[in-house]
């Protein structure tokens, strides 16, 4: 994907999300996927919605939806009241997971990648030297080593990132503040078919 196209997509995505970013408060969660402890919890600082349903604001239960990508053959859960759409890009694809009120959201970018994982901060900064990476941690997604970190790009505001390599592709998951619970749900439920 050209840098220009990626920047345009990211600008559009984060323009929609900036309104909700100020309201995001990150609290501790427990990471059942990571045998090394609470690294995902530390990264996200968010409480897990738990099981197959999430509580809505009125104390009832919200239904969980599943996004399945037919080409890259991955799936993840996200809550009712959110949407998930994929968009073709020059070199890969983007999946935008967004609340109906467009106040918060998550982008998943998938690009061809000719190196085996796991990713490191040094490796990412080789391709994106301007990236502001903080609070890096290694965590597990479906048994794969993933790199989680905070990213505070001036143009987009603060995000939580989870990047990993699988089967010749780089997966970049980028969540705006206020989307931590949904990011946790996605990472916890992520599967490859």
Image: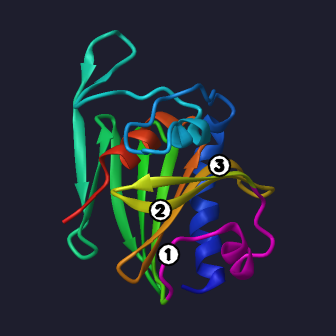
Q: Say which element carries label 3.
A: strand
Residues at circles 2 and 1 in contact by the CB criterion of under 8 Å: yes
Real-space CA distance between mark 3 and mark 1, rounded to the nearest whole angstrom: 22 Å
Most extreme residue toward the front is: 36
The magenta stretch is 115-133
User: Which sits in the foreground, 180 or 10?
Assistant: 180
Q: What is the quadrant of residue 188 in the picture? A: top left
**Residue 85 in view, yes or no:** yes
- When the figure is inspected, residue 177 is found, relative to residue 109, above or below; the finding is above
- In the drawing, what numbered circle is on residue 145? 2
Real-space CA distance between mark 2 and mark 3, rounded to the nearest whole angstrom: 20 Å
- When the figure is inspected, residue 6 is found, relative to residue 34, above or below; the finding is below
Which residue, given by chain and number where applicable, does mark 1 sit on?
Answer: 117
Task: Residue 108 in the image: state x and y as whole percent.
Answer: 45, 62
Q: What is the quadrant of residue 178 in the picture? A: top right
Few, some or many residues within 10 Å of mark 1 (<14, 14–19, 20+): some
Tell me what residue is drawn at x 54 percent, y 85 percent: 1
Q: Earlier in the sequence, mark 3 or mark 1?
A: 1
State left or right for residue 63 relative to residue 183. Answer: left
Tell me what residue is drawn at x 46 percent, y 44 percent: 183
Q: Say which element carries label 2.
A: strand
Q: Earlier in the sequence, mark 2 or mark 3?
A: 2
State left or right for residue 188 relative to residue 124. Answer: left
Few, some or many residues within 10 Å of mark 3 (<14, 14–19, 20+): many
Task: Residue 118 in the image: state x and y as whole percent.
Answer: 52, 71
Q: Earlier in the sequence, mark 2 or mark 1?
A: 1
State left or right for residue 29 relative to residue 141. Answer: right
């Amino acid at each position: 994907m050209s840098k220009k196209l990626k920047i345009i997509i990211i600008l559009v995505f984060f323009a929609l999300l900036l309104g909700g970013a100020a309201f995001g408060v990150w609290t501790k969660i427990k990471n059942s996927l990571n045998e090394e402890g609470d690294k995902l919890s530390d990264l996200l600082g968010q409480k897990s919605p738990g099981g197959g349903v999430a509580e809505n604001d009125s104390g009832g239960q919200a239904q969980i939806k599943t996004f399945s990508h037919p080409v890259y053959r991955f799936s993840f859960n996200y809550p009712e009241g959110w949407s998930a759409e994929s968009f073709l890009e020059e070199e890969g694809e983007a999946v935008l997971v967004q609340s109906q009120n467009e106040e918060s959201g998550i982008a998943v970018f998938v690009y061809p990648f000719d190196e085996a994982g796991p990713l490191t901060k040094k490796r990412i900064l080789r391709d994106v030297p301007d990236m502001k990476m903080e609070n890096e941690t290694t965590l597990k997604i479906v048994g794969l080593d993933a790199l989680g970190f905070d990213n505070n790009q001036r143009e987009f505001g603060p995000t939580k990132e989870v990047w990993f390599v699988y089967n010749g592709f780089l997966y970049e998951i980028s969540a705006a503040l206020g989307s931590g619970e949904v990011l946790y749900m996605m990472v916890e439920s992520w599967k490859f078919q």
